[in-house]
Image (cartoon, helix red, strand yellow):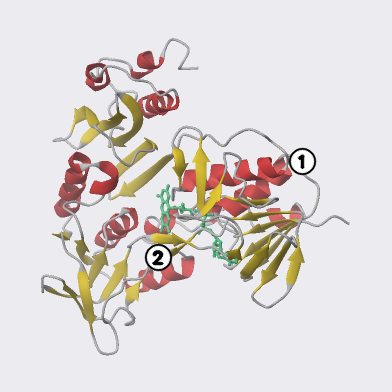
């Protein structure tokens, strides 16, 4: 009897790895170990539709609940892995039990960074990653109540939007000038500020929470500059850290994996939010995106089955805030040119990030809905430009009469 492929982490990456193993025809034993009680699912609705009670999570399951048993995948919920021993090829649970593996995929995602401030442990201060945490925020989100959001990254922005839509009065405290400035740049971030303000969110930019006050539960947040904001509850979205069981593989900002999702020890693979991947196009990167977790989990599974193809997905993500839609393709941390196609003033644009004249990433904001523009096609064309490391003339990129596909060459659209 051969040892199983063990997948640690029943999130997007882990769930897609299990599904891909079976899709690719692997018939050996597969064990999926998950700390959470649910079947693998996508988290995006937890800050959006599910938080607003507009949908349940069934549409976000990686595979229907019955699929795992039907396909002989041993899904073990409520199980915490303490350690992986690559030399012995064993996984040790926190109960002390050991499971031998033939290959192991570590897909344990991230855990929320905690706020370090006086009073940060008071009840009523929430974080968001799991269904249970989302349900706790839902309980608090009663029309007419007040909330402080700490941090205006994607989670903070989306929760601020959803709570506002639920009738909660929101004050957001965050460092920097505008939400998402570090990721998207000042022009798009300025639009994001305007969107939140127009919807009634009070933005306290360039601020940090120094302390929370309250006796039995949080009653106010106090900022570094001394401003006191009364609140019924708070939600912190101050980033995540890779959540990695004890394992003797090379790590630096996550588990270091090569182009094929292999860690530094034989038969150990990693995928999803915790994988610091050697991307053929972008170099070493660790991203925290749904699409990556889905596709990298699948790529790691194929790699475990012997595929030598590098994982070269041109990254992409989206964010929904109020009725605004933001899309992003590629990856860039610093750029030297930002070309706008459309209008920053109207908040409808594609922004293209270039480094040394090469297209590295693009953001689309509210480009849909104009029958004159093939906006889905525009983002797909940007994806293509990133993949081919194109260096078109900026004037052509910004000219809405220029079909972006034409900049990718005659063969590109197929
Ligand atoms: C509220 C929210 C909204 C989001 N919205 C978007 C969005 O709109 N667009 C987008 O692109 N991305 C979004 N994301 C990010 C996206 O959800 C993540 O990138 C994705 O979930 C990462 O998948 P993963 O499988 O790597 O990790 P996870 O989904 O975190 O799964 C990891 C699993 O491993 C389990 N685990 C951890 N440690 C252990 C252990 N020791 N033993 C056993 N199990 C363990 C965890 O409990 C978890 O079930 C959102 C994230 C959140 C939290």
Tell which circle, 2 or 1, labels the residue nearer the N-terminal end: 1
Disc 1 secondary structure class: loop
Q: Where is residue 365 in the image (x, y as percent from the top left)?
A: 27, 37
Relative to 266, 193 lies left or right: left
- Find residue 187 and report its image quarter: top left
Q: Where is residue 283 in the image (x, y as percent from the top left)?
A: 46, 38
Q: Where is residue 234 in the image (x, y as percent from the top left)?
A: 28, 72
Query: Residue 262 or 55: which is nearer the viewer?
Result: 262
- Find residue 219 and report its image quarter: bottom left
Locate the N terminus and report the quarter of the image it occupies.
bottom right
Tell whether label 1 touches label 2 (CB within 8 Å): no
Say above or below: 13 vs 240.
above
Q: Position of residue 203 (x, y in %)?
A: 16, 59
Relative to 272, 224 lies left or right: left
Label 2 near ligand 1 (CB < 8 Å): yes
Residue at 44% over, 48% down: 287
Q: How crowded is mark 1: few (under 14 residues within 10 Å), some or many (20 or more)?
A: few
Disc 2 secondary structure class: loop
Residue at 36% over, 70% down: 114
Residue 375 shows up from this direction: no
Residue extending furthest toward the left: 226
Residue 125 shows up from this direction: yes
Query: Residue 291 or 182: which is nearer the viewer?
Result: 182
Q: How crowded is mark 2: few (under 14 residues within 10 Å), some or many (20 or more)?
A: many
- Which residue in the protein does label 1 denote? 25
């Amino acid at each position: 009897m051969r040892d199983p492929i063990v997948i640690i982490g029943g999130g997007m990456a882990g769930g897609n790895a299990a599904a891909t193993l079976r899709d690719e025809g692997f018939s050996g034993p597969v064990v999926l170990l998950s700390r959470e009680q649910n079947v693998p699912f996508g988290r995006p609705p937890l800050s959006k539709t599910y938080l607003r009670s507009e949908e349940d999570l069934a549409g976000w399951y990686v595979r229907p609940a019955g699929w795992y048993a039907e396909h002989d995948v041993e899904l073990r919920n409520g199980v915490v892995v303490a350690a992986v021993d690559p030399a012995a090829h064993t996984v040790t649970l926190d109960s002390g039990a050991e499971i031998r593996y033939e290959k192991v995929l570590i897909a344990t995602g991230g855990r929320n960074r905690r706020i370090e401030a006086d009073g940060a442990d008071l009840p009523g201060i929430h974080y968001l990653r799991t269904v249970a945490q989302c349900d706790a925020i839902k309980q608090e989100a009663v029309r007419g109540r007040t909330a402080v959001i700490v941090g205006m990254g994607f989670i903070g922005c989306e929760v601020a939007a959803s709570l506002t839509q639920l009738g909660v009065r929101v004050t957001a405290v965050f460092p920097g000038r505008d939400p998402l400035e570090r990721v998207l740049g000042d022009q798009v971030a300025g639009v994001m500020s305007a969107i939140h303000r127009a919807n009634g969110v009070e933005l306290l930019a360039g601020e940090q929470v120094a302390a929370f006050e309250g006796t039995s539960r949080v009653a106010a947040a106090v900022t570094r500059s001394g401003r006191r904001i009364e609140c019924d509850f708070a939600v912190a979205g101050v980033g995540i850290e890779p959540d990695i069981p004890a394992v003797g593989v090379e790590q630096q900002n996550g588990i270091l994996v090569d182009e094929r999702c292999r860690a530094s020890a034989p038969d150990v693979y990693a995928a999803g939010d915790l994988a610091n991947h050697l991307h053929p196009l972008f170099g070493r990167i660790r991203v925290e995106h749904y699409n990556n977790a889905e596709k990298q989990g699948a790529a790691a599974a194929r790699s475990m089955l012997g595929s030598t193809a590098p994982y070269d997905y041109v990254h992409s993500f989206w964010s929904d805030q109020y009725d605004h839609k933001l899309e992003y393709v590629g990856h860039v941390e610093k750029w030297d040119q930002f070309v706008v196609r459309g209008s920053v003033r109207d908040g409808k644009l594609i922004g293209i990030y270039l480094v040394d004249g090469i297209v590295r990433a693009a953001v689309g904001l509210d480009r849909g809905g104009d029958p004159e523009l093939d906006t889905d096609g525009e983002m797909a064309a940007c994806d293509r430009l990133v993949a081919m490391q194109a260096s078109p003339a900026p004037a052509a990129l910004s000219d809405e009469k220029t079909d972006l596909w034409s900049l990718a060459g005659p063969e590109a659209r197929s």
